[in-house]
Amino acid sequence: MIHKKNRKKLPLLAAFLVSQFISWFLSTIALFLSLWVIVPAPALFLYPLAVGAPEISPWLVGINTIALLLNLLRRHQGKVYIILLICNLFALILGLLPLIQFPAANAAIATQMQAVQGENYLAAVPQADRAQLRPQPFILADAFRGIPIRDVRIDRAIGFAKPDGVSLQLNLYRPVEIGKYPAIITLYGGAWQRGNPDYNEEFSRYMAAQGYCVVAIDYRHAPKYRFPAQLEDVQAALSYIKTHAADWEIDLDRIALMGRSAGAHLAMLTAYDSSVLPVRAVVNYYGPNDLIRGYNDPPFPDAINVRAVLRAFLGGTPDELNELYRRASPINYIKPNLPPSLLVYAGRDHIVQAKFGRSLYERLRATGDRAILLEIPWAEHAFDAVFNGPSNQLALYYTERFLAHALKSSDYQGVN
């Protein structure tokens, strides 16, 4: 039989073991996740960790702080304890990195927005619309609870074309109130090989609640359908939107194109070359723009095999299809009097490197076009998949201001 004195010690021993397990478990998980703030993904299946870690940095700071306090309270001696505390501190610093960099990145973007758009560029936007804009570039509570989104009207799977028997559809997101609204036409990313109009729906719903008609459109996918099939599908969608604009409460004089990654590439080609609809503004989230350079200068590590993606999209290498690569590169269509462009690139992007965004920005500015480069130093490709993360909060804050100025200002003058 267990001695009565020993029996009293059992709950204390159990509590000690549980607290030790919790502190070790929290420390291990927090360190593992925090490392991905600075470690690039060497393979595609690890990419969500590299994308997500910087975007959950407020959570990581909280978890690392709790783990550190638990270990400090234990007050053990020895090398293992010291190593554990060092790991806690290192993980905490990693989790803080995006938040530490945030003020400088925000200040640089704010300065650029005012330099390009004007010091008081929102003055001509109606007060009711200005009141709906996010009040701060980063709201800590939203990082934990999510960004609030009001109700909107949603019409899904509206067929607009059937090229080669492929049914292409679009989603329509509108404010609850009947009216006539500026439109944002969005194109999803996915290496031109995958995706559908449901992608990034939080953004579509959010912007619809801000007083826009958001039309998320589909296109055929590589490698079965190669460029320019995707561009033809975008033009078909724009023609369909033009035909149904009145029924959908769209103001055809106030149209913006927006895309992410492969979708941003198609949005730029459409806006910079020729479009069925007049385009007032372009929003490019981490879009490839110089496909020859992208092929010859892939990222390292290259988790998605950029060269294989481009070969699937275009049907060969730049040496084999140089003219096609040039024709498919938006940077080759830069000329004066293009619609204003907001270029959003991730500083740690290992799919579309940020330096390509900088080159595009410099080329646009050299021709006198209005362009704003929003570079997020800590972010990875597709950062906005975490809608309430610090990177997307920053991008969203300036994206909605850029679009309000382009589509809602009474004195907006379009191209330069």
Image (cartoon, grey):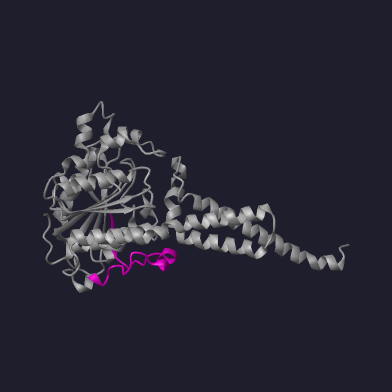
Q: Quadrant of residue 3?
A: bottom right
Name which residue lies at 27% across and 36% down.
Answer: 293
- Position of the C terminus by quadrant: bottom left
Name which residue lies at 23% across and 43% down.
Answer: 162
Residue 387 is at least partly visible in this image: no
Asked if the magenta segment contains residue 138, the reply would be: yes
Name which residue lies at 47% across and 44% down.
Answer: 46
Q: Position of residue 245 (x, y in %)?
A: 16, 58
- Residue that lies at the very extreme toward the top in this rendered image: 320
**Left or right: where 213 falls relative to 83:** left
Of 190 and 73, nearer the camera is: 73
Q: Position of residue 207 (x, y in %)?
A: 28, 62
Of 243 and 131, nearer the camera is: 131
Q: Which residues are magenta?
A: 130-156
Q: Position of residue 187 (x, y in %)?
A: 27, 49
Q: Quadrant of residue 291?
A: top left
Identify whether 156 is placed above or below 141: above
Of 294 and 149, nearer the camera is: 294
- Position of the N terminus by quadrant: bottom right
